[in-house]
Amino acid sequence: MVRNQVLDVLVVGAGPVGLTAAAELRRNGAGCRIVDRLPARLPYAKAVGIQPRTMEIWDRMGMVRAALEAAVPMHGQLTYMDGAEGARIDLALPPDVPYGFAALPQYETERIIEEHLARFGTRIERGTELVSFVQDGDGVVSRVTTSSGEEQEIRSRFLIGCDGAHSVVRKTLGLTFEGDAFPDEYMLADVEVDWSLPQGYGVRAMHHGEDGAVDDLLVCIPLPGHRRYRMSMLVPPELSARGRPGERDDVAHGLEPERGRTPGLEHIQAVLDRLSPEPTTASAMRWSSVFRISHRLVNRYANGRVFVAGDAAHIHPPTGAQGMNTGIQDACNLAWKLALASTGRAHPRLLASYDAERRPVGEEVVGRTVRHAAEGVQADPGDPATIMLREAQLLVAYPDSPIVGPAAPRNPGEEGPHAGDRAPDCGGLTGGVATYPLRLYDLFRDRGHVLLLYAGTDGPVASFGELASTAHRLSDGRMWTCVVLAEGADMSEAADLGLRADADADADPVTDADAAGNLDADAYGLRPPVFRDTREEFRRAYRVTDSAAFVVRPDGYLGTRLTPVAAPELSAHLSRVFDV
C-alpha cells in the first residue's frame, strides 16, 4: 500500500505513558513523533511501584530484561499503628504468574522505555510544547513551539494526549474532568536510612488523634540502593503550598517544587523521629517536594481522532501504585489499534473500543483507590488471593468489549480464560530446535496478533492449516500462528501443517507468479511452529481438554476463545477487528 507523508500519530508527553504509546506504535508498524515541553527527564522518584501486569507488558514489548536489571523486588509491607506493630503483608502470587511486584524510580522507568523506543529510530523532541490543534475528518493539525522558539505545524492522522493531570489536549477537546481534591498535603523525599528493617518491604506507620482520625503518617517504598526509600508524609504547616498563587488550573494534583518551601532533611527526620519503627537517621536526600492529590476521571477517552491516556484521563490517590501502571495499560490498549487504523485495515469501530474498554477500568481504579485511601484495603472485602491479583492488575479484563468474542456465555463456576481476559503464561513447552522447555510468553514476545491453537490427544490437527490460512488472509498477514499439542497427541499430522493454498489463493500478490495457488508456506511464515505441552501447564492454565483456538491481541488479552475450533467462528471474530 502506498502511503502519503502524513504522520500516523503525534504523541504529546514523554512520561512512562507517552513513551509506552510511542514504543508500541513503532513496534506495531506505525510512524509517530513524541514531543515533551520539558527540556530533560525529571530526576524524581515519583511513581515507583511496578505491577506484575506491567512487567508482562514489558515482556511482550521485548524490554523486560532491562527493567528486571534495574528494579528491586517488593516483598510486602510492614504496618505500625500508634507505635504498635500491625499485620505484615506479604505480596504473594500464584506460581504461574511470571513476575512479582517491584519498585523502580520513575526516571529509570522513563530511561528504559526511551532507550527501547530509540531502537526504532524514534527519539523524544524535548523542549517542544503543544500550543493548539484542530481536527477534521482526515486528521489533526497541531501547532507546537520548539526549544528554539520556532513554531511548527504537524499534520497527523491521530493525536494522543499523555500530557498529565493538567493536559492541554484534554482541555482543548473540552472534556470534563469531574472529581475533587483531598484536603491534605504531603511531602515526598528520596532518602537513605540506617534502620535494620528487612529489605524489600515497604513501611506504613500511622498515628491517630483523640478524635480517631489519622494525624500523622509515614509511607516508605524501597528503591534501588542501600536502604534507600521514597518516603511520603503529611506536610507541616510551614511548608503548606495551599492557597498560594501560581496554580496552573483547578486540578490540585502532583508535585509542587516551585511553590512553597522545599522539604529539608530536618522535616523528614522529624517525622521519622515520631513514627519510625526503630530509631534511625535519614541521610543522602536526593530530592524532595510537596504534593497534592485529587481524584478525577475524564468523561470520555477520545473525541474523533484525538485520545487521552494516563493522568490526562484519570488521577487518584497513589494507594496500591495503580496510576502509572493503569496509564501504561491505556497506552498499550490504544497503540495497536491506532497502528492498525493507520494502515486503513481496521474495522471502522475498532478505535471506539478504546473508550469502551479502558474508561470502565479507570473508573474502577479511581473509586477503589479513593476507598482504600480513606479506609484501607479492607474497604473492598474478598479473599486475600483475589485482592492480591486485583492489586497486581492481573484481573483487568474486557468481557463486554465490542471487539472480543463471539463466544458462548460463561457458565457459573466455569474456569479458564475467556474472551476479554488476560492470556496467562505457562511453562513446559518443548519442540523445534530448542532442547529446553519454553514459556508461552517466550513465544508471544515481540509479536502482534497471535492465533494460538491447541489439540488434545484426539484433536483435529489437520484442520489447523485452514485456520492459519484464514487468520493470515483476514488479518492481511498480521497474525502469527503457533500450535500446542497435548503430551499424548500425535505429532505426525502437525509436521504437515501449512498454508492451504485453496483457502488463500488470492490473498497475496505473489499468487500471480503461481497460478495454481501453491504458495510456499515457509516463505510467508505460515507453517506454524508446534510445541508439546510436556508438563500439562498449558492445559491447566487455559482449562482445555480437547481442541481450542485462542486469538491473543498485541496487548496480551484474548480476543476470542473457540471450543471447538471452526474457521467461520474465527472469521466472525476477526471481522470485528480487521476491515475484511
Image: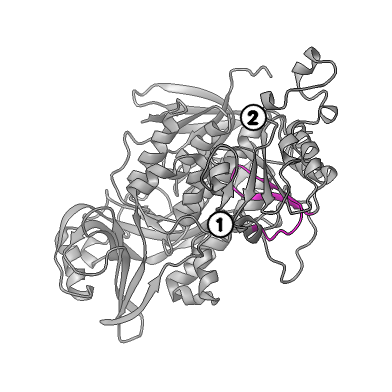
Which one is nearer the viewer's eye here, 362 or 465? 465
Q: What residue span does the magenta drawing correspond to?
A: 542-563
Please state if 193 lies on the left or on the right of 230 as rendered.
Answer: left
Q: Residue at x 41, y 28 (%)?
A: 123
- Which amino acid is tagged 2? Ser
Based on the displayed image, in which of its 4 quarters is residue 361 positioned?
A: bottom right
Q: Is residue 326 visible?
A: yes
Q: Is residue 308 visible?
A: no
- Which amino acid is tagged 1? Gly
x%, y% of residue 562? 77, 52
Q: Is residue 308 above or below residue 298?
A: above
Query: Circle 2 — which element?
Result: helix
Q: Considering only order in the chain, which callout, 2 or 1, is on the residue closer to the N terminus?
A: 2
In the rendered structure, find residue 362 and report the number of the disc placed on it: 1
Which one is nearer the viewer's eye here, 40 or 51? 51
Count of labels shown?
A: 2
Confirm whether the magenta stretch covers residue 545.
yes
Query: Circle 1 — which element?
Result: helix
Q: Quadrant of the C terminus?
A: top right
Based on the displayed image, in which of its 4 quarters is residue 304 positioned?
A: top right
Q: Quadrant of the N terminus?
A: top right
Please state if 348 lies on the left or on the right of 339 as rendered.
Answer: right
Q: Nearer the viewer, mark 1 or mark 2?
A: 2
In the rendered structure, find residue 342 and report the number of the disc placed on it: 2
x%, y% of residue 453? 71, 46
x%, y% of residue 557? 63, 50
Q: Residues within 10 Å of mark 2 (few under 14, many from 20)?
A: many
